[in-house]
């Protein structure tokens, strides 16, 4: 029986459970979970999970796999170590879900001989080339050295892992590319609510995050109708990519979307708010956390800077809301389940076709396609794309 290793890296998202379930369902392979992301690979922290348990959790929000992060740049020996560990664990294919960083890791790992596949998983929906992304996850600030890659490869071999699948962002997928050079068969998928994985229009977790924003905007509209004349500003995650804010604004009928890719002068923004307030009961503004220059990863509070500048100009107090890490969870939407299923189906097709070391993305036609791990990097909002043009037409940006 084939043995498939599954890893997620970076911020956790809902929807990953169904992806893992579909991989096991379609391959009838033994599923081996590596908890803790890339650090978990290094630590050889793996366990087997039954299809019985995967089915029970397939449409639930409670994650069946733990994630992790690392900023550490692995050296060649570390990729080779990971490759050996996968081989020892009898892992035939490694599948990783995450953002652009996770998928870049996959590319490097594939050069160590690991058969790798990647899938976009992020609520920010910023995986390059994909229209859509998908776990407990994990992070690490540590840059891996070559010996650590080699350790991971040995551990996978000892665990009889045939394939390693990793879900994460761009950093995680870059890790996979390096690990593949140690002989591990790696596959990556984008998994980040930021939806910022290169080449992909969707990453796992994105649809459910948008749904959480929709629910919040609906509540603000209700309270705005009870007490007319209010202005609400909601800060969202997304890092340097405004995809989550942009698409959420369109789908939730918000009035204005403030994204890093399209700065609006404060006086002009104040005029737009005032005009909207004359015509409707409330104004709802969605603001990406990376909108202001003061942003750095982990920073929250971009709206505080804007509110101080805007309130004297509009003469109205702005009510603020920060939607943070709760965006990463919630019952997965129907779209989330579907996207995870078609990603899993394509990963399985690639494995059964004899492909090695690929990332699976969702293209502009909402079709899953395999690309080389070496291509993975972060992306921003496409100002020539459909969503941005629609937002311009709606006067949201």
Image (cartoon, helix red, strand yellow):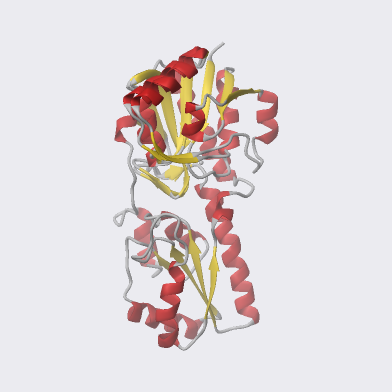
Q: In this view, does 195 lie above or below 248?
A: above
Left/right of residue 376 with respect to residue 297 in the rendered view: left
Image quadrant containing the N terminus: top right
Residue 370 % position (x, y): 38, 29
**324, 214: nearer the viewer:** 324
Asked if residue 73 shows in the view, the reply is: yes
Query: Which of the two residues, 310 or 52, is positioned nearer the viewer here?
Result: 310
Residue 174 pos. (x, y %): 35, 34
Q: Position of residue 42 (x, y in %)?
A: 47, 27
Image-based side of 371 in relation to 59, left or right = left
How many labels, in total? 0
Residue at 33 percent across and 65 percent down: it is 293
In this picture, is 351 found above or below 260? Answer: above
Residue 92 visible in this rendered orientation of the protein? no
Depth order, front residue of 125/153: 153
Q: Answer above or below: position of 158 versus 245.
A: above
């Amino acid at each position: 029986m084939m043995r498939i290793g599954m890893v997620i890296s970076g911020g956790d998202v809902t929807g990953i459970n169904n992806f893992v379930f579909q991989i096991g369902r379609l391959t009838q392979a033994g599923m081996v979970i590596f908890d803790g992301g890339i650090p978990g690979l290094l630590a050889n922290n793996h366990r087997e999970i039954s299809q019985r348990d995967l089915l029970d959790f397939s449409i639930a929000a409670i994650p069946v796999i733990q994630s992790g992060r690392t900023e550490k740049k692995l050296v060649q020996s570390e990729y080779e170590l990971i490759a050996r560990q996968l081989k020892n664990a009898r892992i035939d294919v490694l599948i990783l879900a995450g953002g652009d960083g996770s998928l870049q890791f996959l590319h490097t790992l594939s050069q160590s001989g690991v058969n790798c596949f990647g899938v976009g998983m992020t609520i920010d929906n910023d995986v390059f080339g994909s229209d859509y992304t998908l776990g407990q996850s994990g992070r690490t600030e540590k840059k891996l050295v070559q010996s650590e890659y080699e350790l991971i490869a040995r551990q996978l071999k000892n665990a009889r892992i045939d394939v390693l699948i990793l879900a994460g962002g761009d950093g995680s997928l870059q890790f996979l590319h390096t690990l593949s050079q140690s002989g591990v068969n790696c596959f990556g998928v984008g998994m980040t609510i930021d939806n910022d994985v290169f080449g992909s229009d969707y990453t796992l977790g994105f649809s459910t995050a948008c749904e959480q924003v929709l629910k919040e905007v609906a509540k603000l509209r209700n309270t705005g109708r009870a007490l007319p004349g209010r202005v609400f500003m909601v800060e969202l995650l997304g890092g340097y990519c405004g995809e989550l804010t942009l698409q959420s604004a369109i789908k939730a009928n918000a009035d204005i979307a403030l994204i890093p890719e399209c700065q609006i002068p404060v006086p002009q923004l104040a005029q737009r708010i005032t005009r909207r307030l004359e015509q409707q009961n409330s104004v709802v503004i969605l603001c990406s956390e990376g909108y202001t220059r003061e942003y750095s990863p982990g920073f929250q509070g971009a709206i505080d800077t804007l509110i101080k500048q805007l309130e004297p100009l509009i003469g109205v107090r702005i009510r603020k809301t920060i939607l943070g890490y709760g965006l990463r969870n919630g019952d997965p939407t129907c779209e989330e389940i579907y996207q995870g299923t078609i990603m899993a189906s394509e990963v399985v097709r690639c494995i059964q076709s004899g492909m090695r070391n690929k990332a699976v993305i969702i293209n502009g036609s909402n079709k899953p396609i395999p690309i080389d791990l070496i291509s993975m990097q972060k992306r921003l909002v496409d100002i020539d794309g459909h969503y941005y043009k629609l937002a311009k037409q709606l006067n949201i940006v």
